Amino acid sequence: MAHGMASSMTRAERFTRSLVAMVTSETPTFSFEFFPPKDDAAAEQLWGAIRSLEKVSPSFISITYGAGGSTRDRTVRLTQRVLEETSLTPMAHLTCVGHSVAELRQVVGHYAAAGVRNILALRGDPEGGLGRPWVAHPQGLNHADELVRLIRGLGDFTVGVAAFPDGHPESRSIEDDVETLLRKEREGAEFAITQMVFDVDHYLRLRDELVRRGSGLPVIPGLMPITNTRQVIRMAELAGQPMPTAVTDRLERHGDDAEAVRQEGLAIATEAARRMLDEGAPGIHFITMNRSSATLEVFGNL
């Protein structure tokens, strides 16, 4: 498909395609996550990645949302462009950070006007980053389950939520994380996507505990192929958790051999994805960092 040309798939089909039907089918879903670009060069890189990944026909893609709505307009524009110019079904992110309820309603209205019917509802990290205390907007919402309720009350939206197999930074136990997901499900969440999975056993533990509690919430594991040593530090910071030594030991044994580190990272991601799919995961959600090559290689391995 040439750049800028409309997809042959009808616009209505991309609007009405059910993420829930895909996630609950017997065929695993494969989805990709992008973030809005900060400048023209980043935009060109992002669109190239989207076009490359479009060729493998992912189930859907997701587009993140900056803290406090810092990328709100770019997120809406990018999501709309995906609908207009590709064959992809987008899911937009929305967070509570820095927004009043009135502003959240407005953002949902922007998504609806753009044709977006799939939203990932997140509380979001505290302003200032992990480790800072959470402070809700005076006229805003305090928890993701409240945002799920708000979105479901505003129209015919499919709403997903986040899950934390390694534990949310503010949670005291796995029981806390499970109870939080159950509240989101009761408010209308229809599936969950995890933060980056570093330890497959932690993903399985969270999923199995949900099942034990009677939940029907499909939980899609998030996965990001680590291709350089800088990413190890960055990913641990983003997750708010140290990376397992089983991962770091395999990467560190290659020292400064960048290509060997990259290949080891791809192998680790492939092994984790295969195991989770074999254990019944409904799909894999690839966190792309707006680049396509590593994701495509792991996808090809699967």
Image: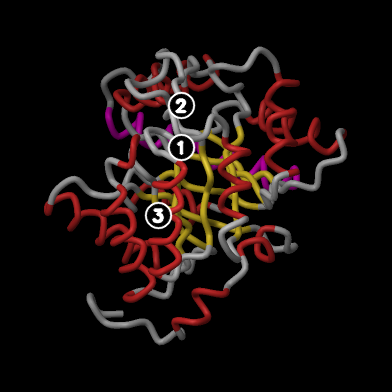
**Amino acid bearing label 3:** Gln
Q: Give the residue drawn at x 56%, y 53%.
A: 151
Q: Is residue 256 left or right of residue 104?
A: left
Which residue bears the numbered disc 1?
96
Q: Is residue 118 left or right of residue 229?
A: right
**Amino acid bearing label 1:** Cys
| Quarter containing the N terminus | bottom left
Q: Of the numbered discs in the image, which one, if any, rests on residue 69?
A: none
Which residue bears the numbered disc 2?
136
Task: Give the mark nearer the N terminus: 2 vs 1.
Answer: 1
**From which residue to which does the magenta span run?**
258-280
Q: Is residue 160 magenta?
A: no
Above or below, 202 against 224 in this view is: above
Nearest the viewer among 153 and 297 is: 153
Q: Give the residue drawn at x 42%, y 75%.
A: 87
Circle 1 Cα neighbour tier, 10 Å, few/some/many (<14 / 14–19 / ≥20):
many
Which residue bears the numbered disc 3?
106
Above or below, 149 against 15 in this view is: above
Nearest the viewer among 234 and 244 is: 234
Q: Is residue 267 magenta?
A: yes
Picture quadrant where residue 126 is located:
top left
Task: Give the mark nearer the N terminus: 2 vs 3.
Answer: 3
Circle 2 Cα neighbour tier, 10 Å, few/some/many (<14 / 14–19 / ≥20):
some
Task: Give the image location of residue 196, x and y in percent.
Answer: 51, 34
Q: Please, what is the dominant secondary structure of the magenta stretch? A: helix
Task: Give the image location of residue 186, x and y in percent.
Answer: 75, 43
Mark 2 and mark 1 residues within 8 Å of each other at the beta carbon: yes
Above or below, 38 against 200 in this view is: below
